[in-house]
Amino acid sequence: MPLTIRPDSTEYVTATVTADHDLSEATIEVALPATGVLPETWITADVVSVAEVSAGKWVATYRILVGPASGDVALEAGTYDWILRVTDSPEVPVRKVDTVKVVA
């Protein structure tokens, strides 16, 4: 289910990523291009927590501030892809995580 927000709202958008190893040293970035467009601008996410949730399974919780009041990015009405990039040498996976709908 896509995240739906208003263009005049400023709020943290939080998500998680899982891996088979500790993500404490990884850089987590988010891009929000219009749906179907390749990302050009990346936002370094705040990592809220990294925890081993079971033997060999790690979860990192991260967030960015979306909106016009000092947000990392302000979005106009439209539909955007939530793209995640994790820089964790030697891997740099890039994945579409979700869809963000901005509605007035």
Image: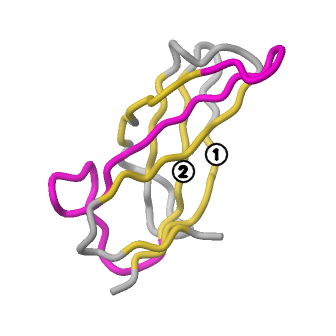
Residue 7 rendering spot, x and y as whole percentages = 29, 75
Q: Pick the residue in front: 45 or 34.
A: 45
Query: Element under label 1?
Result: strand
Identify the residue position indicated by label 1 in the image.
Answer: 95
10 Å crowding of disc 1: few (<14), some (14-19), many (20+): few
Residue 2 picture quarter: bottom right
**Residue at the spot x=81%, y=15% of the render?**
56
Question: Which label belongs to residue 83?
Answer: 2
Amino acid type indicated by mark 1 = Arg
Residue 36 higher or lower than 38, as above or below = below
Residues at marks 1 and 2, CA–CA distance in whole angstroms = 6 Å
Query: Element under label 2?
Result: strand
Give, as a single range, the part of the protein colored magenta: 51-79
Q: Quarter holding the C terminus?
A: bottom left
Indicate left or right for 33 with 10 as reference: right
Which comes sooner in the sequence, label 1 or label 2?
2
Colour mapping used in the image: secondary structure
Residue 10 picture quarter: bottom left
Residue 63 rendering spot, x and y as whole percentages = 43, 42
Marks 1/2 in contact by CB < 8 Å: the verdict is yes
Q: Pick the residue in front: 59 or 101.
A: 59
Amino acid type indicated by mark 2 = Ile
Q: Which residue lies furthest to the left in this view?
A: 69
**Residue at the spot x=48%, y=68% of the render?**
80
Residue 87 rendering spot, x and y as whole percentages = 53, 24
10 Å crowding of disc 2: few (<14), some (14-19), many (20+): some
**Residue at the spot x=48%, y=73% of the render?**
4
